[in-house]
Structure formats: C-alpha cells, structure tokens
Amino acid sequence: MTECNDKKCPFHGNIKLHKRTFTGIIIKKDTHRTALIEFPRYYYLKKYERYEKRRTRLHVHNPSCINANIKDKVIVHECKPLSKTKNFVITKIVK
C-alpha cells in the first residue's frame, strides 16, 4: 500500500459505495487510473432451452493505493458516476 491523495478513492477520498458488487479479471490498464475488467455470465435462450456464455466488460477506477495490475482478480463496487463511462471502483484484490 502506498500513500493515496486520490479524491475518488473509497478509503482515502470522499466516495460512497453502493450495493452492487462484481468480481472480475483486469484485462486492460490505463495511465489515467482506469482499468477494464471482464467477467462471464450466462444468458438463457428460450428457443433452444439452453444457456450461452456471454461476457460483461466494465470500466473501473483503479485507485493509486490499490494499483491492481493486468490479470489480477479484483472486487469492484458501484459508486456515483466518476466520468462518462466509469461507475465502479476497485476495492480489493483477490489472491
């Protein structure tokens, strides 16, 4: 853990977390504290009475005190909109 001066950090800033949480893997990382996570979900096809596998991708805020890297499994929480596409923030790295 490093020192964090991030206003958008849920631990050191002034961001309140909401109820929705997801667990995913980071597939892309940006220089502006943004990461892209991905997790699979199953979608039911009524016609074939089967499930198909789909994936969901979310843009999340990566605080400097957590600083998760690519291929890390992380837990994200919903928060207020941080930018045009970011509505989630990384809260924990799962080993």
Image: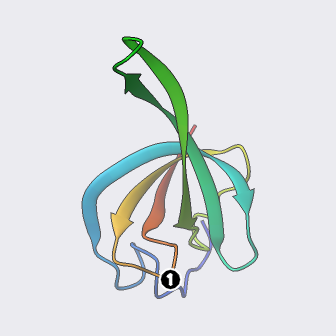
Q: Is residue 9 visible?
A: yes
Considering depth in this image, is 21 or 55 the residue closer to the camera? Answer: 55
Other-residue count near label 1 (Cα within 10 Å), few / some / many at <14 / 14–19 / ≥20: few
Residue 5: percent from the left, percent from the top? Answer: 54, 88
- Residue 37, position in %: x, y? 59, 52
Instruction: Tell me the residue that label 1 is attached to.
Output: 83
- In the rendered view, would you say 71 is above or below 58? above
Report the quarter where the C terminus lies.
top right
* Whether residue 67 can be seen here: no
From the viewer's perspective, tell me whether residue 57 is left or right of residue 67: left
What's the image's color scheme? rainbow
Residue drawn at x 50%, y 22% is 52
Q: Quadrant of the N terminus?
A: bottom right
| Residue 33 in which image quadrant | bottom right
Residue drawn at the location 42% of the way across and 12% of the way down: 48
Residue 84 locus on image (x, y percent): 51, 81
Q: Nearer the viewer, residue 16 or 52?
A: 52
How many numbered dots are placed on residues in this image?
1
Give residue 40's position: percent from left, percent from top.
52, 34
Is 4 situated left or right of 28 in this image?
left
Tell me which residue sits at (64%, 63%) in the image.
35
Of all residues, the one furthest to the top in this rendering is 49
Amino acid type, callout 1:
Ser
Helix, strand, or loop for circle 1? Answer: loop
| Residue 41 in the image: above or below residue 62 | above
